[in-house]
Amino acid sequence: MNKLSKIIVVLFSSLFLSFAANSVEVKFGHVGKPGSLFSASVDHFAKLANKRLGNKGKVTVFGSSQLGKDKQGMQKLKLGTVNMWLPSSVMASIHDEFGVFDMPFIIKDRKHMAKVEKNVLPGMFKNLEDKTGYKVIAVWENGFRHITNNTRPINTPGDLKGIKLRTPKSKWRVKMFQSYGANPTPMSFSEVFTALKTGTMDGQENPYAQIASAKFQEVQKYLSITGHVYTPAYVTVHKDHWSKLPADVQDILEKAAQDTQKFVYKEAAKLEKSLLKVIKDAGVQVNEADKGAFIAASKGIYDQFGSEVPTGGALVKKVSALAK
């Protein structure tokens, strides 16, 4: 190798090392399986963010609980071994105020949710960050939840009596189904299919996108359309590690996450129609539940939330008022 060649090699090596030193790898984890709304949402965000980041960095996606279940993922976020996570129901176990989204039928539709995001969530996010260090940079969606099981169709709360029902790790979801007479058990999403197949659990509750992508229709006989809870999803980071990213990278990621919301809502509405057909075509018996009966049976959980969470009553009033 002549002297000029050596100089060129050294220059290119220096440029590569400089790029490597300044390029940021952003690990984004979630529990959604391929075909789920979570998977579509995070993949869309990563494509958008990576295009805008250019040589500044790269978002790498780890779905299907590859980096752990929600509880583990949030811990890794705190430790800094994961940069972004997409929690939903589990947020209520991290900060009690988020249990407001476990109040049955409190969110009427996405227009209502948009008002809640604008007028209520900023205060909740500040309290979350001040107390836990977790910072939400955008709001996406998990969706409206419905009940599946292998025992009977669920028309009224009384039909849930004795049914072993898997719930997310949200104490308010557990309390809600206990008040309806079910036997709820918190369980990580990645364990649910096996629990349903083996009979450890009789049923579960999730949006269509989670039900279909996890193939619960293969191990469940009944789907009861309740829409009992709407669950937002939160694009979450931890302030201690987020603040260490270059400011321009933070701005790109935050803007891309917020810009992804429009895609998420459009995709969610589309999946609500197409995936219900997938579930029906698998032979699952579908019924419309008596929502009025469920609403009438829900007063106790609202009262409990209002008495146990210092800001609970005020949050319920704020959220409910925005539905009008």
Image (cartoon, helix red, strand yellow):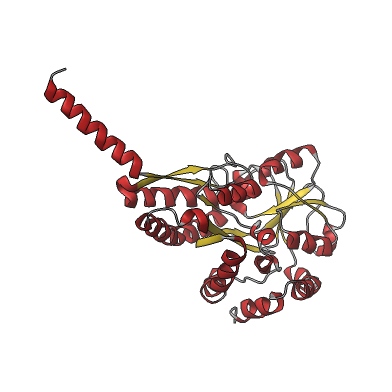
- Image coords of residue 198 (percent x, y): 78, 37
- Image coords of residue 42 (percent x, y): 48, 50
Q: Residue at x 35, y 41 (%)?
A: 21
- Image coords of residue 261 (percent x, y): 46, 61
Quadrant of the drawing holding the N terminus? top left
| Image quarter of residue 197 | top right
Q: Residue at x 45, y 57 (%)?
A: 243
Q: Nearer the viewer, residue 319 or 236?
A: 236
Residue 10 relative to residue 92: left or right: left
- Image coords of residue 149 (percent x, y): 76, 49
Q: Residue at x 79, y 72 (%)?
A: 304
Work out whether residue 130 can be spotted.
yes
Residue 319 relative to residue 192: left or right: left
Q: Nearer the viewer, residue 108 or 275?
A: 108
Q: Nearer the viewer, residue 273 or 10?
A: 10
Work out whether residue 223 can be spotted.
no
Q: Is residue 98 above or below residue 59?
A: below
Q: Residue furthest top?
A: 1
Residue 263 relative to residue 94: left or right: left
Quadrant of the drawing holding the C terminus? bottom right
Q: How many marks?
A: 0
Q: Is residue 145 above or below residue 35?
A: below
